Amino acid sequence: MSRESQRQRGRAIRTSFGLDGRPEAAPGTDDFLAEVVFAGIWDRPGLAKPDRALCTLAALSVLQRLEPLEPMTGVALDLGLTPRNILEVFVQVGLYAGFVTTETSAAVARKVFEARELSVAPEPPRTDKHEQLDALGREVMAKLHGDRANQGYAAPGNNITGELYPAAIRYGYGELWSRPGLDHRQRMLCAVAAFCAMGLEGQLRKFSKSALNVGLSRQEIVEAVIQTGPYGGFPRALNGLGILSEVL
């Protein structure tokens, strides 16, 4: 495919996303981004576009790129994600970037929902006892990480990390990974994208290997990292791919 053909393809994708009409950042950048981002990244095989939207929302949220997060919320809706799906992305990655990012990202998304007259049904509070959440958390950890669930900072005998990690088991794995709105496969895509965008190499190494345990293929994991390139920077995406080359 020639460069001009690739640009035309990228422009068509950008138009289908409703992202036309913005002022050009600098002379020639519209064509450059059409070629590199939309044709070069969004049009790659190996990962469906709704999944790419999940990864993009995750990266924009953890990095608090709130201005582009608003139109990307609209793109995600147009690709078939529901308002609840989108909000759950922000909940999931808030575990990694801080829940203040959940609140600010959700506020941006809700403006898009309101403009489209979309609503999210309220949900009754969970009634699980702490013991139930702890047991569920250990079960989810084992499903995701297998024998590695209790290694490193997750080791039960570590008196230092043990001051915090039981809360991660209870509320992270026990509650957040079990919430409706996203399945484990989708939450893992969000986690991989978030860790790559933030440059959290230890977590990316652990979770990218675990992603195979929830139904993601090797190629889908690679594509989830590639998808973060235009939003978190290509150096971090390349670092992430370097990690995948080791663990996969």
Image (spheres, helix red, strand yellow):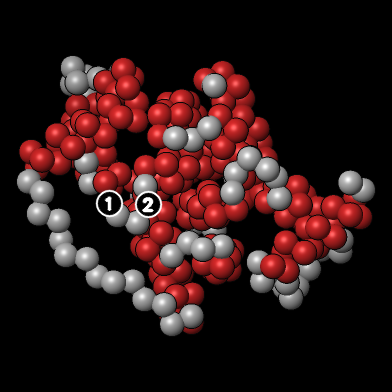
x 73%, y 69%: residue: 15
Q: Position of residue 32 (x, y in %)?
A: 82, 55
The amino acid pointed to by label 1 is Arg
Q: Which mark is residue 179?
A: 1
From the viewer's perspective, tell me whether residue 139 is left or right of residue 50. Answer: left
Instruction: Report the front residue among 2 and 197.
Output: 2
Q: Are marks 1 and 2 in contact (CB under 8 Å)?
A: yes
The amino acid pointed to by label 2 is Leu
x 26%, y 34%: residue: 140
x 23%, y 46%: residue: 175
Residue 212 visible? The answer is yes
Residue 63 visible? The answer is no
Image position of 153 with respect to 130: above or below: above
Characterize the local packing of mark 2: few (<14), some (14-19) or many (20 or more) Cα atoms within 10 angstroms.
many
Circle 2 SS class? loop
Instruction: Report the front residue among 48 and 204.
Output: 48
Residue underneath mark 2: 182
